[in-house]
Image (cartoon, rainbow, N blue to C red):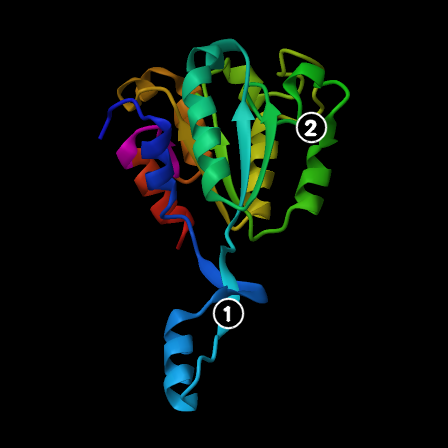
Amino acid sequence: DDQVLGTRQMQIALRRLRKFARQGAAEELDVDGTIRETAKQGILDVQLVPERRNRIKVLMLFDVGGSMDAYIAECEKLFSAAKSEFKTLEYFYFHNCLYDHVWKDNHRRSSTRMNTWDLFHTYGRDYRVIVVGDASMAPYELKSAGGSVEYMNEESGEVWLRRLRQHFDKTAWLNPEMEGYWHYTQTISWIKEIFENHMFPMTLKGLEDMTRYLSR
């Protein structure tokens, strides 16, 4: 359960977070319906149904830079797995803690910023949110206005994390740091509390527990 995961294992674990519905034009062969109607008519009567689509919408927020550099490979695998499993997948980046903006392209972070309020207005409550980060930072980065190491944020990261939790119906924090070390870092405990214990390790069991929670 605590092994390092490959992309395929992540795909299988994330597959729990799927709710299918038939939507759109009738383009997929309905085998049972075709057999039934053909038997009734006495001639071939092809029946079509809309394609089954996964209607779960996922928003992923990735912590990048600093201590997260050690987990780049794992995060790349996770994103690849999520992209293959979810038809509606949106993603953004932040550094250490969520503040008043996120960005789409880490190489052009200053020109691809989105205000976090705009993020809330753009993506509805029904999006399942997965925050990916080690939750490891100086206490002031989470608790204090002006705590960001990059600029002078007017409100603390804790305020923004609580807003995130209030806006979306289901949010979870996925932590690549080994769970056995979590109690050594104060901010991990604080963020876990903010997320009402919905922080999960990036292991097979952690992913399964996370998707089980998000799919309820």
Numbered label attached to residue 3: none
* Percent coordinates x, y for residue 108 in the rendering: 71, 17
Q: Is residue 16 magenta?
A: no
Question: Residue at image x 63%, y 51%?
Answer: 124
- Element at label 1: strand
Q: Earlier in the sequence, mark 1 or mark 2?
A: 1
Q: Residue furthest front?
A: 43
* Res. 75 image quadrant: top left
Q: Which residues are magenta?
A: 198-205
Which residue is tagged 2?
A: 101
Amino acid type assigned to the residue bearing label 1 in the image: Val
Question: Residue at image x 44%, y 70%?
Answer: 30
Which one is nearer the viewer's eye here, 77 or 166? Answer: 77
Q: Is residue 199 magenta?
A: yes
- Element at label 2: strand
* Percent coordinates x, y for residue 136 in the rendering: 45, 17
Quadrant of the frame with the N terminus? top left
Question: Residue at image x 33%, y 40%?
Answer: 12
Amino acid type assigned to the residue bearing label 2 in the image: His
Which residue is tagged 1?
A: 49
* Res. 153 image quadrant: top right
Q: Are marks 1 and 2 in contact (CB under 8 Å)?
A: no
